[in-house]
Image (tube, helix red, strand yellow):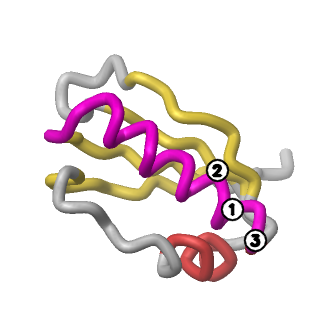
Amino acid sequence: MKILLYFDWSGTRKELKEHDKKMQKTCIETGVEHEGLFGSMSEKWNYVWLFQANGFEHFLEMSRKVPRPIFMTHYITEILMPIRL
C-alpha cells in the first residue's frame, strides 16, 4: 500500500535533510520503501513523503522508531489502497 505523509516544516532545509536521512535509515531497517520527499502543491502542506509498506501496521512500526521533530508542526497520513476492478 502507498502511504502519503503530508506535513508542514518550520525548520531549515538542512534540518529537513537530516530528518529525511533518519527516515530513510529507519525505512531500510524495517523494510518500508521510502519513495521520496516531495514538495506539495497543496496550499495546506509544505511537503509530502511517499512510502510503500505491506500495511498500515508495517508503516507504524517504522514511524514509531523516528521521533517527530519539533519542526514538524503538524501532519496527516493518507493511505492509498489498491483496488481490483
User: Residue 17: x percent and y percent?
Assistant: 44, 37
Q: In this orientation, does residue 23 appear?
A: yes
SS at circle 2: strand
Please name the residue shown 19% across and 40% down the image: 11
Upstream in sequence: badge 2 or badge 3: 3
Identity of the amino acid at label 1?
Cys
> Is 40 above or below relative to 33?
above
How far across and how far down the image is residue 60, in percent?
Answer: 55, 77
Residue 54 visible: no
In front: mark 2 or mark 3?
A: 3
**Sequence-earlier tag: 2 or 1:** 1
Front-most of 82 and 17? 17
Identify residue for label 1: 27
Crowding at mark 3 (Cα within 10 Å: few <14, some 14-19, many 20+): few
Q: Quadrant of the C terminus?
A: top right
Give the residue number, with chain letter if any, for mark 3.
29
Residue range corresponding to the magenta coloring:
10-29
Residue designated by label 2: 51
In three-dimensional space, the C-alpha distance between marks 2 and 3, rounded to whole angstroms, equals: 14 Å
Q: Relative to 14, is 82 above or below?
A: below
Q: Secondary structure at mark 3?
A: helix
Amino acid type indicated by mark 3: Glu
Q: Which of the 4 image quadrants contains residue 43?
A: top left
Q: Nearer the viewer, residue 43 or 11?
A: 11
**Position of residue 51 measured from the top left corner of the image (x, y, whole percent):** 64, 50
Residue found 27% across the figure and 54% down from its top: 75
At horizontal 23% and vertical 52% (from top left) the residue drawn is: 72
